[in-house]
Image (tube, rainbow, N blue to C red):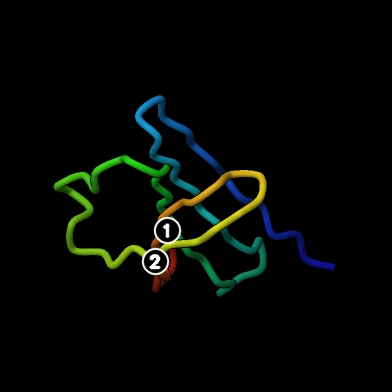
Amino acid sequence: MIASPAANVFYASGLAINVMYTIADAGKRAAGFKLSLGVEIPEELAAFTFARQRSKLAGEIRGSYFVIKGTH
């Protein structure tokens, strides 16, 4: 079984960033951004499209992600 770790960073502003990856060689990697309700999209992330999601636990959030290509 191959583990799929994730690293999460949460900011007091309501922005959360997570990076998901597999340990296997040439495994998939992606980064995601989530914004709490009422948080404006930072200028640095304006190029991303944020989808609205509803959750019983978190309420309404907006999220976007992109796949990291190549080897890092």
Instruction: Tell me if mark 1 has few (under 14), some (14-19) or many (20+) residues whose alpha carbon lies within 10 angstroms of its own.
Output: some
Residue type beneath disc 2: Ala
Up the image or down, 17 lies above or below 63; here it is: above
Up the image or down, 36 lies above or below 68; here it is: above
- Residue that appears at 44% across and 67% down: 71
> x and y percent of residue 36 in the render?
42, 42
Residue type beneath disc 1: Gly
Check the picture and name the quadrant holding the N terminus.
bottom right
Mark 1, residue position: 63
Q: From the viewer's perspective, tell me whether residue 29 is left or right of residue 13.
A: right
Q: CA distance from mark 2 to mark 1?
A: 5 Å
- Residue that appears at 41% across and 30% down: 11
Up the image or down, 10 lies above or below 28; here it is: above
26 vs 64, nearest the viewer? 64
> x and y percent of residue 38 in the render?
33, 41
Instruction: Tell me if mark 2 has few (under 14), some (14-19) or many (20+) residues whose alpha carbon lies within 10 angstroms of its own.
Output: few
Q: Which corner quadrant of the image does residue 52 belong to?
A: bottom left
Mark 2, residue position: 51
Callouts 2 and 1 close, C-beta under 8 Å: yes
